[in-house]
Image: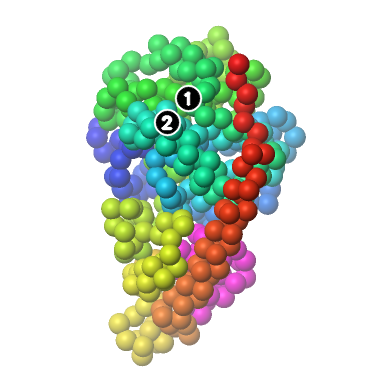
């Protein structure tokens, strides 16, 4: 596999052509009509692809058992808007009957990110899990575990490691240092963990940069026929664009990246300085209207800040026609972001008070 066809889940490379990604990696184009009451990012094309989605749609329609699983990477003390979208998709499937599993990837944080197990646990309990709850996760319907405590995951990871060669690993990931290998094989066991006791479909909602883990898991399942696992399904969302017009928000560009949480004054400054689709002069703008496709603030509102379709369409029409200026659009976004950030922090604090009620798997 050539280098341009490598997606690196640990790197910061940009993926500029989603259609090409779908073709190169054999993904299914996401069709929101497949699922009942699709959420905001499904309806608006932010969710763009997946694998074996009809199996999950069938499970929802016919009320069959299936699961949704995702991991918390506690390598940082904050999260980003991409994580918010993943949680929104977990919430969707949770509300549509999925058994829900959230693992804390403390071993991966140690092997691939240099974070101690103790620090990973602390960050997960004090911030990451409360943040997931604040973003919509129902703790009463969610099963949690730490990788480092799950011997079944560890034992199966060693078994699965026998099903992949070094050349195949390098073809998927681009390189194969020991830390990456251990982290990836452990993720395979995590993805399949809900099937260790009962065979059933499962869906993994992630950003497209995590697709290598899905492909590795599906390859191993095909070679482990005696276990009769379902191939895991997956769902991919696009990146939230950088405020300077780049395809992905990145902490390497702090002035174009919004984190959760972040001081609202800092966020407003970033929004007001963001790349605009407004014209060079007010007269030209009123005459020709905005180039919305180039406007990062409208994209931010579409992906994260405006739930109601009628409201978004009204903003789109007024901005596209030139009735609304770029400055006015940015002030609307600032107000909505302030409301979201305030509510997020209140909900995080509320969730922290209930951390002792989490349903963690009890291992022998």
The residue sitting at 29% across, 45% down in the picture is: 13
Tell me how far mark 1 sits from mark 2, CA to CA.
8 Å
Based on the picture, tell me whether residue 320 belongs to the magenta stretch: no
The residue sitting at 48% across, 48% down in the picture is: 83
Q: Tell me which corner region of the image, top left, top right, bottom left or bottom right, holds residue 66.
A: top right
Mark number for residue 117?
2
Question: Which residues make up the magenta segment?
Answer: 297-319
Count of marks placed on residues: 2
Please say if the residues under marks 1 and 2 sit with CB atoms less than 8 Å apart.
yes
Quadrant of the snapshot with the N terminus: top left
The answer to whether residue 43 is visible is: no
For the stretch drawn in magenta, what is the main secondary structure? helix
Q: Is residue 277 left or right of residue 70?
A: left
Quadrant of the snapshot with the C terminus: top right
Q: Is residue 183 left or right of residue 93?
A: left
Is 45 above or below relative to 170?
Answer: below
Based on the picture, tell me whether residue 304 belongs to the magenta stretch: yes
Mark 2, secondary structure of its residue:
helix
Is 135 above or below relative to 163?
Answer: below
The residue sitting at 41% across, 67% down in the picture is: 267
In the picture as drawn, the residue positioned furthest to the right comes out as 63
Q: Give the x, y percent position of residue 150.
A: 53, 22
Q: Is residue 68 left or right of residue 5?
A: right
Mark 1, secondary structure of its residue:
helix
The answer to whether residue 262 is visible is: yes
The residue sitting at 32% across, 21% down in the picture is: 168
Chain-order first, disc 1 or disc 2 = 2
Q: Give the x, y percent position of residue 319.
A: 47, 78
Is 131 above or below relative to 149?
Answer: below
In the picture as drawn, the residue positioned furthest to the left comes out as 3
Q: Which residue is mark 1?
A: 148
Q: Give the x, y percent position of residue 197.
A: 64, 17
């Amino acid at each position: 596999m050539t280098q341009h066809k490598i997606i690196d889940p640990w790197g910061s490379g940009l993926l500029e052509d989603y259609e090409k990604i779908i073709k190169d990696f054999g993904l299914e184009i996401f069709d929101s009509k497949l699922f009942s009451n699709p959420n905001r990012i499904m309806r608006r094309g932010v969710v763009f692809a997946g694998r074996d989605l009809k199996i999950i749609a069938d499970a929802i329609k016919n009320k069959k058992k299936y699961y949704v699983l995702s991991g918390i990477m506690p390598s940082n003390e904050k999260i980003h808007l991409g994580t918010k979208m993943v949680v929104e998709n977990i919430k969707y499937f949770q509300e549509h009957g999925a058994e829900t599993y959230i693992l804390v990837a403390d071993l991966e944080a140690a092997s691939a990110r240099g974070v101690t197990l103790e620090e990973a646990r602390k960050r997960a309990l004090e911030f990451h899990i409360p943040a997931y709850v604040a973003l919509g996760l129902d703790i009463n319907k969610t099963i949690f575990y730490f990788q480092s405590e799950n011997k079944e995951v560890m034992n199966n990871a060693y078994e699965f490691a026998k099903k992949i060669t070094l050349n195949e690993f390098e073809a998927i990931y681009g390189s194969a240092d020991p830390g990456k290998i251990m982290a990836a094989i452990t993720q395979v066991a995590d993805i399949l963990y809900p099937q260790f006791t009962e065979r059933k479909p499962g869906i993994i909602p992630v950003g497209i940069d995590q697709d290598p883990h899905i492909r590795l898991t599906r390859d191993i399942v095909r070679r482990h026929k005696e276990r009769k696992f379902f191939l895991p399904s997956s769902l991919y969302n696009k990146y939230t664009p950088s405020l300077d017009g780049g395809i992905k928000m990145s902490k390497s560009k702090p002035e174009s990246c919004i984190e959760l949480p972040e001081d609202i004054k800092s966020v407003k400054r970033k929004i007001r300085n963001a790349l605009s689709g407004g014209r060079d002069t007010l007269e030209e703008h009123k005459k020709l209207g905005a180039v919305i496709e180039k406007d990062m603030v409208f994209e931010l509102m579409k992906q994260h800040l405006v739930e109601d379709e009628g409201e978004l369409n009204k903003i789109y029409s007024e901005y596209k026609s030139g009735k609304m200026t770029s400055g006015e659009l940015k002030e609307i976004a600032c107000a909505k972001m302030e409301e979201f950030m305030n509510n997020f922090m209140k909900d995080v604090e509320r969730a922290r008070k209930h951390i002792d009620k989490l349903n963690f798997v009890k291992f022998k």
